């Protein structure tokens, strides 16, 4: 890697869920560092597969939002992020869990989930902030909140019909 003596392999994904399979295989093969090159969706896919293994999750934030990388102070510039990976200190982090699904930054329900669902399934390749703004405005106009039940720490329960509800592991 650029004269550093670090060997690496770039393995492109072929379909949704492939990053999880690749990360799981790498951890089972004893790979020490698995880098998620993408955005928060890629981080979740790769990271979930590494929970309970000895592999370390690295971040190369090249996605649309990169909220998790930003929260951890990982440089958004790809070159700087690669250099940071070379000198990074391994640290433990918290992960969130809703039912049996882990998340690293935030998990949204209600309007937030609707916008993400629409963003993920939209036509075209334009990524970034502006498509989110348009989809948020469009979704807000047509969204009808549903009643949900929240159970906290397995014992406190309450019901609400939120427009936005976010469970956060980061600021």
Image (cartoon, helix red, strand yellow):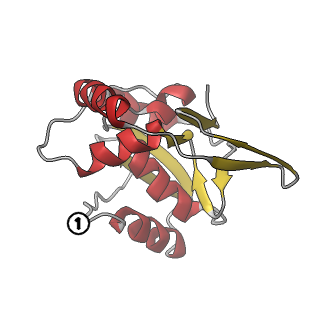
Q: Secondary structure at mark 1?
A: loop
Q: Residue at x 37, y 62 (%)?
A: 19
Q: Furthest-right residue in view?
A: 155
Specify whether 165 is left or right of 58. right
Residue 95 position, x and y percent, is: 65, 47
Give 1 or 42, whichever is nearer the viewer.
42
Q: Quadrant of the C terminus?
A: top right
Corner quadrant of residue 132: top left
Can residue 5 be seen at all in this image of the molecule?
A: no
On screen, 89 above or below 13? above
> Which residue is under mark 1?
14
Give 116 or 137, whichever is nearer the viewer.
137
Q: Quadrant of the N terminus?
A: top left
Residue 158 position, x and y percent, is: 78, 44
Q: Furthest-left residue in view?
A: 124
On screen, 37 above or below 167? below
On screen, 128 above or below 125? above
């Amino acid at each position: 890697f650029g004269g550093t003596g670090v060997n690496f392999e770039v393995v492109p994904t072929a379909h949704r869920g492939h990053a999880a399979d690749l990360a799981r295989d790498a951890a089972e093969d004893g790979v020490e560092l698995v880098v998620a090159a993408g955005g928060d969706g890629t981080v979740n896919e790769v990271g979930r597969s590494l929970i309970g293994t000895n592999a370390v999750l690295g971040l190369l934030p090249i996605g649309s939002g990169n909220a998790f990388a930003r929260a951890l102070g990982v440089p958004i510039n790809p070159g700087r992020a690669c250099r940071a990976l070379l000198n990074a200190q391994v640290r433990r982090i918290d992960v969130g869990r809703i039912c049996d699904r882990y998340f690293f930054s935030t998990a949204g329900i209600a309007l937030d989930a609707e916008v993400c669902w629409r963003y993920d399934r939209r036509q075209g390749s334009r990524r970034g902030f502006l498509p989110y703004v348009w989809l948020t405005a469009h979704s807000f106009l047509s969204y009808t909140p549903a009643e949900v039940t929240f159970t906290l720490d397995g014992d406190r329960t309450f019901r609400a019909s939120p427009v936005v509800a976010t469970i956060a592991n980061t600021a």
